[in-house]
Image (cartoon, helix red, strand yellow):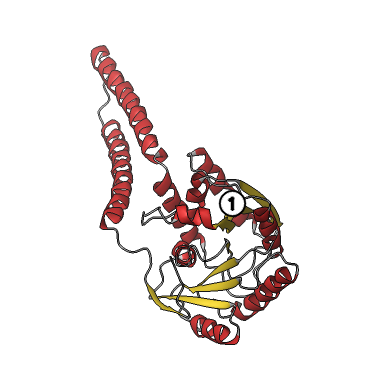
Amino acid sequence: MNSKLLLIVPCYNEQEVLEKTYERLNNYIQQLVDKNLLSDTSKICFVNDGSRDRTWQMIEELCRKNSRITGIKFSRNFGHQSAILAGLLENVNQYDCYITIDADLQDDIEAIGMMVEKYQEGASVVYGVRNDRTSDSWFKRFTAESFYKIMQKMGVPVIFNHADFRLIDNNVLVELDNYREVNMFIRGIIPTIGFKSENVYYKRAEREAGESKYPIKKMISFAWGGVTSFSTFPMRMVLWFGFFNFFVAFGIGLFVLISKFTGFTVAGWTSIVLPMAFFSGSNMIAIGLIGEYIGKIYQEVKARPRYIIEKFTETPGKS
């Protein structure tokens, strides 16, 4: 069965790896076409997320050289998740299935064939799951795995060791198009849509060139965005912390009363300053956390576009 596939590759300052990425993906897609797994009308869409180097010029050159390549250019940098969304939503109803993969190709492209096979066997969603992260540093591996465990404990339905390397079919994409929120945490949203899902497992490779686009600061920001977009667990923690503070305050008050009635009073500022610092600090944390959620509501109410497209190399026939 020949399936019409769109392979979506978000790009941000990828001039060092883009040519090699194109060659490897194009050759592999052709292999799947030759095996009658994919239709010859399958394409690769590079989404330029406001790159400051020659990434877009290279994408245009690839499009002129190969009709299988299409490109989308953002007006500025909107972020990795928005680039994935643009590649998907601007091509809804045009393909049988869609796969998203990062431009650095640390995700094994051989898994693409396995995903297509799972799709043809009836799966609507196929997650690429890393079963070997030995190429990552200890710190990267520890923080990444901790992220998935914490998210799962908070009730966010993420797939352990799955990033954004996945296949979805057009039915899933149509439903994803109904999600209108600005703060889209795709890793958490896709599992909530439902439909039959499968996993394929692969070993994560080292980045061949260029720099990682997810330093520790962005990783923390991404993780926090996922938590606050998908879970109210931190708010519940504030409530529990409030109860804890209440019992601590009750204990301090009881101690003060007993000291007064027994005549054991100590002159000094420590017993005054410490409780004040503790309670004022915890109150500021609670207010800040509430403000974070109110800020999310503020962004959603404004309903600004999740991305702005400056240019297509060809106009998708979205219907």
Tell me: 14 left or right of 288. right
Residue 66, percent from left and from top: 60, 83
Residue 246 percent coordinates (x, y)? 31, 26
- Residue at the (75%, 67%) spot, across then down: 35
Q: Is residue 124 visible?
A: yes
- The answer to which of 262 and 310 lies nearer the viewer is 310
Q: Is residue 192 above or below residue 92?
A: above
The answer to whether residue 131 is visible is: no
Task: Determine which quarter of the picture holds residue 138.
Answer: bottom right
Picture coordinates of residue 159 (x, y %)? 58, 47
* Left or right of residue 271: residue 97: right
- How crowded pointer 1 is (Cα within 10 Å; few <14, some 14-19, many 20+) is rated as many
| Location of residue 105 (image quadrant) | bottom right
* Residue located farthest toward the top when viewing the structure as drawn: 262
Q: What residue is at 59 percent from the left and 49 percent from the top?
A: 145
Q: Residue furthest right?
A: 35
Tell me the residue at 47%/56% (across/down): 174
Q: Please give the residue where the numbered disc 1 appears in the rendered image.
A: 124
Q: Quadrant of the C terminus?
A: bottom left
Frontmost residue, 273 versus 242:
242
In depth, the one of 279 and 151 nearer the eye is: 151
Quadrant location of the N terminus in the rendered image: bottom right
Check disc 1 and give the amino acid type.
Ser
Q: SS for tag 1?
A: loop
Q: Is residue 50 above or below residue 286?
A: below
215 versus 237 height, above or below: below
Count of numbered labels shown in the rendering: 1
Residue 126: x and y in percent read: 62, 53
